[in-house]
Image: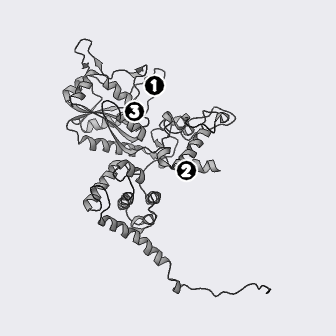
Amino acid sequence: MGDRNLAETLLSAFSLISRDEFHDHLRRLIRERAALVDGVVALYAERELRHRWGTPHRLFKESKKRPLRAEGKVGPAAIKATKAYDPSVGSEGIVAQLITELCKESPRKFVSHPGPEQIRRKKVRAFWIVTDLIGTGDRAHRYLEAAWRVRSVRSWWSGQFLKFAVVAYASTNRGEKFVRGHPCDPEVFHVMPCPTIDTAFSEIEATAIKRLCEIYDPTVPPQRVDPWVFGSPSLGYGNTGALIVFAHGAPNNIPLMFHKTSKSRVSPWIPLFPSRVTAAVDCRSFGVGMSQEKIQKLLSNIGQLRLAKSKAVVEASIPTAEVFMILGALSRPLRLSDNALSLYCGMPTYKVANLCRLMAGYGWIDSRRRLTDAGQSQLAHARKNVAQQIHKLLPPLCQRSQKPYYPKSLRLSV
């Protein structure tokens, strides 16, 4: 029974991203960031590239005679199988479709997978890799390395004609740090930080949940599970322990117990997302949109219990309740980090930034995102509603009707 409760706790921490949310939020993020770029933006869908001994092949062909320069009209294919016996398409398919739509909508701003000659002709100023998730950051780092191995690309970067970035729907802290460490000094933009076992739970809870994932790992026989050894690959690729699932598929960074099938006849195991396919899950289960219940739960999680029960939140519209949730989250540390606020509030980072700018315009927070007197008064007024509700429900003691006491049994005196 303890394992079942722990598994329910783990499942409740998953973020289930619908197709519409993935498309709309990622599209909006790309357009907002591209508006800050003075020039054309080249978009490339992240995918596996061919490599030799761990080193990826160059992204563009180079001339055989000196000076060695990149050449070719056509850039890398958006979708291409790296193995002849496995022509399956991953998340790069839905990302490539989004890139095509953006390029058709704004052909003067975006260009899809351009080659060297097209980069020169259109004066591309930004090289962006688009993906759904930065888990370990290995694939994005390899794609950057494939471009970095081309001498002309390094020349464009050193002359400050071309800047690199990786745009993702979600990103783990570890993956983002690894990608940022590439020599091309790329920026990383994401809609929301990816929750993991380490970030979604306390240290004690995370240890218990990791042990649960190791015990119920369908790829390891139960008798081989060592209760004293931690760090097995049961938490997914790179031992990430990601807690996010997309409507177009589950990443390989989630715990194996959710997508691997046991081959044992003695202890069969049917995963929730077999072979990382999520099509069998009810579409109504996906979505990170806000509701009154979710806002109240998130406020309770950050310690704003009185605010969660207030009429200002319970009876308010969703946008108004989101504003109060941001105000409550700003009373905690790490208020300057959009990632931390996004984890607290369960909202995209760009939405958190927009709400903070809105409240700064109202004068509720200052430039350091600290609550001003006006912001404190707004929170105090919202919490005051809770006391008023309790006061109405509980009349004073002198007005309470008390029933007279009658003894029902008598004891003998000693």
**Secondary structure category for the residue under label 2:** helix
The image position of residue 37, as x and y in percent, is 22, 39
- Earlier in the chain: of badge 2 and badge 1, it is 2
Q: Is residue 345 or residue 316 the one in the foreground?
A: 345
Q: Residue at x 26, y 15 (%)?
A: 63
The image position of residue 199, as x and y in percent, is 46, 46
**Secondary structure category for the residue under label 3:** helix
Q: Amino acid at mark 2?
A: Thr
Q: List the residue tagged with mark 3.
A: 93
Question: Distance between the Cα atoms at labels 3 and 2?
Answer: 32 Å
**Secondary structure category for the residue under label 1:** loop
Q: List the residue tagged with mark 1.
A: 87
Q: Amino acid at mark 1?
A: Pro
Where, quadrant-wise, is the C terminus in this rendering? bottom right
Question: Distance between the Cα atoms at labels 3 and 1?
Answer: 12 Å
Q: List the residue tagged with mark 2.
A: 9
Q: Residue at x 44, y 30 (%)?
A: 89
Q: Residues within 10 Å of mark 1 (few under 14, many from 20)?
A: few
Kindly report which numbered mark, 2 or 1, lies closer to the viewer in this rendering.
2
Name the side, left or right, on which 358 lies relative to 383: left
Question: Distance between the Cα atoms at labels 2 and 1?
Answer: 37 Å
Residue 100 seen from this side: yes
- Given contact means CB atoms under 8 Å apart, are the residues at marks 3 and 1 in contact? no
Q: Residue at x 40, y 42 (%)?
A: 170
The image position of residue 311, as x and y in percent, is 41, 68
